[in-house]
Image (cartoon, helix red, strand yellow):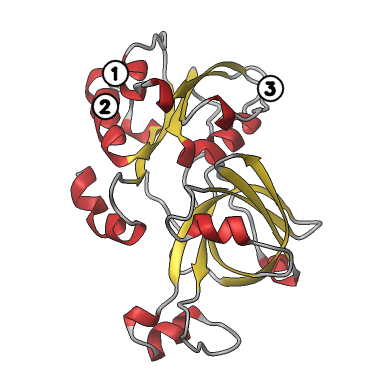
Amino acid sequence: MARRGEGKPMIQARVLRTERLTPQMIRIVCGGDGLATFQHNGFTDCYVKVLFRVPGVEYPEPFDLDAVKASLPREAWPRMRTYTVRHHDPAAQELTLDVLVHGDAGLGGPWASGAKPGDEVLLRGPGGAYAPRADVDHHLLVGDESALPAIAASLEALPPEASATVRLLVENGAEQQPLATKGNVDLRWLHRADGADLVAEVRGLELGEGRVQAFVHGEAGMIRELRTHLLREREIDRELLSISGYWRQGRTDEAWRQEKKTFMG
């Protein structure tokens, strides 16, 4: 399914508060008058781009990404990272992002670790393409930590009559989170530290008869194997499959974006 997010308006927000959900997941709650214009698109994988100013670069104010791209060389353009909108409260003008942190590595993790109330947050969006459908017999939700916020939001959207199988790969038991749902859900956490194999787990699943809608996202090498399995062996309808490599082992976010189309095929 195509993901849509380009050409969306800029939003200037501020950090309101933060919370460490697990050792590797930090919740950032953003707010401010700029969020008055934000309209959630209804997808449970709804996402925004967080823009990071390049240190030492002077940007036009008020900040305008189109103006930046027109007036500054590419190396001065702000860096971007993509995060699922975990919650949106339009009445309170609050938007919540759950950010995965791997020590001091990367860009988004250190930002989340050091975020404090009042810090500027530049957002662009929303994008997204997936939400659980009512006209299917079963839902399959599979992913690693990078997909956890979207899967959590999807579980919350399931009605009581919905049936779902969920498999989540995280580092260890400390990374498990309480997940709310009204649906009839078979949920299993897998731990990377114990050598868990998410691909093998999905291959061994019994999904029963009927139409299956699947949301499968995470590390690209793993996702490429699962896409082949789900399309060719399970014969899941391509229209009912949302599948993508959110990241690739050994690649920066910028490098992965450049090679993603070729790698995923």
Percent from the top left, x then y, of residue 74? 33, 80
**SS label for mark 1:** loop
State left or right for residue 41 relative to residue 144: right
Earlier in the chain: of badge 3 and badge 2, it is 3
Residue found at the very far right of the displayed protein: 91
Q: Residues within 10 Å of mark 3 (few under 14, many from 20)?
A: some
Percent from the top left, x then y, of residue 109? 51, 54
Percent from the top left, x then y, of residue 23? 58, 39
Q: Vertically, is 56 above or below 241? A: below
Residue 108 at least partly seen: yes
Residue located at (51% from left, 25% from top): 135
**SS label for mark 2:** helix
Residue behind mark 3 = 182
**In front here: 180 or 115?**
115
User: What separation in Å lies between label 2 and label 1 (alpha carbons)?
Assistant: 6 Å
User: What separation in Å lies between label 1 and label 3 (alpha carbons)?
Assistant: 27 Å
Q: Mark 1–mark 3 contact, CB under 8 Å?
A: no
**In front here: 131 or 110?**
110
Residue behind mark 2 = 231
Residue 243 at least partly seen: no
Q: Please, what is the three-letter code of the amino acid marked with disc 3?
A: Lys
Q: Please, what is the three-letter code of the amino acid marked with disc 2?
A: Leu
Residue behind mark 1 = 234
Percent from the top left, x then y, of residue 175? 56, 32
Q: Mark 2–mark 1 contact, CB under 8 Å?
A: yes
Residue located at (23% from left, 28% from top): 228
Earlier in the chain: of badge 1 and badge 3, it is 3
User: What separation in Å lies between label 3 and label 2 (alpha carbons)?
Assistant: 28 Å
Residue located at (20% from left, 46% from top): 263
